[in-house]
Image (tube, rainbow, N blue to C red):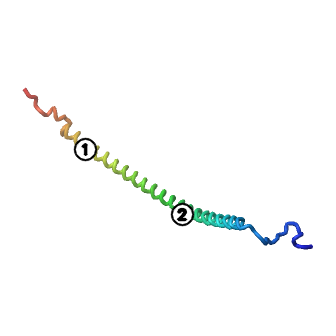
Amino acid sequence: MDISKRPYSYSRITHEDPEETQHRLAQFLIYKALKKADTRRSWLGIRIVRLKIKIGTRLKKMKWGFVSTVFSAKTELCKQVNFALKSWKQLLRGKRGTTVGSMIPPMH
């Protein structure tokens, strides 16, 4: 049995249209370019995801550092205000618990 008479056999093309050749070449080049871009994109995507994770953890650490600093500053401010209020209270009451106003003699 001859090869050309077998079902699903391949035959050699002796003459091909130049437009068809250009079209096949263009399709092949497009396929190669897309494949190359796809592999580059996935590699770049992995790098971007890693970078986002690094940035996210650093921002989270900075946020908690800032919050703790603000909290400690707020606590220190409250302590200072309470101390100042106690001092003013003691000055206004005097040593025996009397107010400053009662220590001043009335004016006639």
Image quadrant for the C terminus?
A: top left
Image quadrant for the N terminus?
A: bottom right
Sequence-wise, the earlier of marks 2 and 1 is 2
Which residue is more in the foreground, 41 or 83? 41
Residue under the image location 89 percent in, 69 percent down:
5
Rendering coords of residue 45 (x, y %): 56, 61
Mark 2 — residue? Answer: 47
Rendering coords of residue 64 (x, y %): 43, 53
Of tags 2 and 1, the one toward the viewer is 2
Look at the numbered disc 1 and give the secondary structure of its residue: helix
Rendering coords of residue 49 (x, y %): 54, 59
**Relative horizontal placement of residue 50, taking residue 20 as reference (left or right):** left
- Mark 1 residue crowding within 10 angstroms, few (<14) / some (14–19) / many (20+): few
Residue under the image location 58 percent in, 65 percent down:
40
Distance between mark 2 and mark 1 Cα atoms: 55 Å
**Relative horizontal placement of residue 82, taking residue 71 as reference (left or right):** left
Q: Which amino acid does label 2 sit on?
A: Arg
85 vs 4: above or below: above
Mark 1 — residue? Answer: 84
Q: Are marks 2 and 1 in contact (CB under 8 Å)?
A: no
Residue under the image location 16 percent in, 35 percent down:
100
Q: Which amino acid does label 1 sit on?
A: Ala
Which residue is more in the foreground, 49 or 42? 42
Look at the numbered disc 2 and give the secondary structure of its residue: helix
Q: In the displayed image of the protein, which residue is found farthest to the top? A: 108
Residue 62 figure quarter: bottom left
Rendering coords of residue 25 (x, y %): 68, 67
Residue 21 figure quarter: bottom right
- Mark 2 residue crowding within 10 angstroms, few (<14) / some (14–19) / many (20+): few
**Relative horizontal placement of residue 64, taking residue 85 as reference (left or right):** right
